[in-house]
Amino acid sequence: MTPEEITAAAAGGLPPSVGCEADHHGVMLRVPPQHWLTALAFARERLDCDFFDWLTAVDEAGEGLSVVAHVYSLAGRHHVLAGTLLPGSAPRLPTATGIYRGAAWHERETHEMFGVDFAGHPHLAPLLLPGGFEGHPLRKDFVLAARAAKQWPGAKEPGDRDVPHARRRLPPPGVPEGWQRS
Amino acid sequence: MQAGRQPPARSRGVIALLEENCTVCMLCARECPDWCIYIESHKEPVPGHEYGGGPDSAHAPAGRGRQRVRNVLDRFAIDFSLCMYCGICVEACPYDALFWSPEFSYAETDIAALTHEQGRLREWMWTVPPPPPHDEGAPPPPETPGHVS
């Protein structure tokens, strides 16, 4: 199916609140959370997307958490991305395992790393992190201990063993404000 | 890599330091995404500039010239337990002090021993191969007359 055919099928078969963006890579369905399972079922049955590739979340700092799934049609050789935006404070989504069994591990990892609750998931136990780990590591507000505890070696100035810093220290690139302990 | 086989040209194994080329600009330590290059240095005056009368004494009158100062490297260490062999330090160095070497057999039982200090990084320099010839069809190198910039 070409992106145009998929867009047309989506316009006909999905609720109007589901947006559809197509480019040369494939199609992205922007789904409100209440239509998540509808969109995935549509992709599986009507768009012939029988291959489940991945499901993950993106921390859209401030705007919430978006959950994105990538499915593919082996016969039609077209990709479909489905994405939904959840509030950051209590992100909940029904499980996709009823439609794609393979989503079980992906949802388990997303739950562990981002704190998204997948209602109806058969086994939402920790997958990768050690027992007793607190917090959700892939969220943007989770402080990376290695960056917070270690002094940035690039903060030194050439020849500064004996000379105190004449000017303000550069912050290390990529480390948010307030992480460094000194 | 099989024993006895030559690794391909420009293979990336360990990173070596040629201390003579290092001016302690610290660009490598700043650019390293893993924060695994540790540099310490101090400044030393360069002797011989206290008085004028040098090559440009027509412009600089005899008498005290400005005291020149240079950076002296105290410590240059790379923590290979953190290094991800991206090569950003080798590319960032403006003075060609860091080199790739194809050596890879330096496994240790103690993780602290994976931090290589200056002496060990110099030893790796002797394993750095000469630059391989350019591929067929590549533009001539900048040093040759045929180069088109």
Image (cartoon, rainbow, N blue to C red):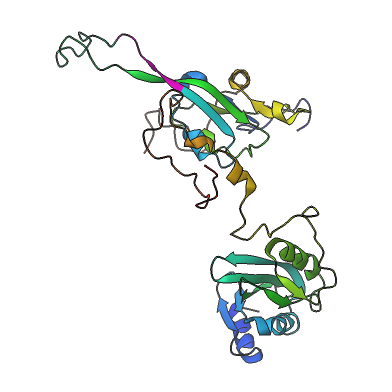
User: Is residue B80 shown above or below B73?
Assistant: below
Q: Residue, x 50% and y 34% (percent of image)?
A: B28
Whether residue B102 sits left or right of residue A61 in the image: it is right
Whether residue A169 sits left or right of residue A38 in the image: it is left
Residue A142 seen in the current view: yes
Give x and y (percent) for residue A60. Answer: 56, 67
Whether residue A63 sits left or right of residue A94 in the image: it is left
Of the pair A93 and A13, the residue shown nearer to us: A93
User: Is residue A154 shown above or below A101?
Assistant: above
Q: Is residue B43 magenta?
A: yes
Disc count in the image?
0
Whether residue B110 sits left or right of residue A61 in the image: it is right
Give x and y (percent) for residue A124. Answer: 81, 67
User: Would you identify the image quadrant in which residue A142 lies?
Assistant: bottom right
Of the pair A11 and A67, the residue shown nearer to us: A67
Farthest residue toward the right?
A: A122
Give x and y (percent) for residue B30. Answer: 49, 38
Q: Residue, x 48% and y 37% (percent of image)?
A: A155
Q: Is residue B115 magenta?
A: no
Of the pair A132 and A94, the residue shown nearer to us: A132
The quadrant of the image that shows the N terminus of chain A is: bottom right
Q: Residue, x 50% and y 44% (percent of image)?
A: A172
User: Would you identify the image quadrant in which residue B63 lies?
Assistant: top left
Residue B91 seen in the current view: no
User: Would you identify the image quadrant in which residue B52 lies?
Assistant: top left
User: Is residue B74 shown above or below B112?
Assistant: above
Give x and y (percent) for residue A151. Answer: 55, 38
Farthest residue toward the front?
A: A182
Of the pair A43 and B149, the residue shown nearer to us: A43
Where does the magenta region start and end?
B42-48
User: Is residue B142 shown above or below B64?
Assistant: below
